Image: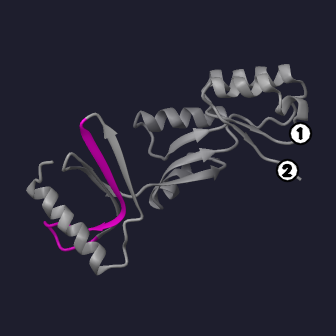
Amino acid sequence: MTITPSFTRVLLALVASSLTSASVVKAQQRVDSGSATTVAFVHVNVVPMNRELVLTDQTVVVQDGRILKVGPAAKTDAHVHLQTPTEFPLYLANGVTTVFNLDGRPAHLLWRKKIAAGEMLGPAIFTTGPIFTQANKPKEAVRMVDEQAELGYDAVKIYNGVSKEASTHRRGQEKAHAVDGPRTTRARF
């Protein structure tokens, strides 16, 4: 591993930061990709050597002894019901860079596409399709899963209005997983 001056400065800053504050490395992730080793130090404070300040709650990604990226730690909100893009700045301002929307509509797929293309500012969106509330036969459930997969939704959400036969139908579950989408269920009482 090559130790560069910039690596040494940031490493010293990381050590100094953890010694002078309550910040502790909460997680460290190692990824081996061939001969390269990548380490992510998350939720750390960084003291830059070119100005007098402390960057709090940062993620530092190091590969083969070189710092690839330093930036704020990202958060995911795993249960949202998106209504309008005017919500997006609030997510980003609070460090939420990814959301899992649990009542999808075609607009959500459009927003996701625009965000990915850089045409709209917002968090990355993973979304179910519209909630399944009335599929009564297994064949109908399989058709609905296929339709949502073809449209580009990431998962299906099933409420208890769906018959037990349809929601536990093996072929429907296999179809959901075959299109790389988990099945999300929620009982309503």
Image quarter of residue 111: top right
Q: Where does the image place residue 51, in percent across and percent down from the top left?
A: 16, 69
How has the structure been colored for display? one colour
Judged from the image, the secondary structure of the residue bearing numbered disc 1 is loop
The answer to whether the residues at label 2 and label 1 have Cβ atoms under 8 Å apart is yes
Q: Earlier in the sequence, mark 2 or mark 1?
A: 1
Which residue carries the number 1 mark?
Answer: 161
* Magenta-colored span: 35-54
> Is residue 2 at least partly visible in the picture?
yes
Q: Amino acid at mark 2?
A: Arg
Q: Where does the image place residue 149, in percent across and percent down from the top left?
A: 65, 24
For mark 1, does the 10 Å Cα neighbourhood hold few (<14), some (14 to 19), or many (20 or more) residues?
some
In the image, taking residue 122 as reference, residue 37 lies left or right, namely left
Which residue carries the number 2 mark?
Answer: 188
Residue 41 falls within the magenta-colored stretch = yes
Judged from the image, the secondary structure of the residue bearing numbered disc 2 is loop
Q: Give the answer, above or below, for where 11 lies relative to 83.
A: below
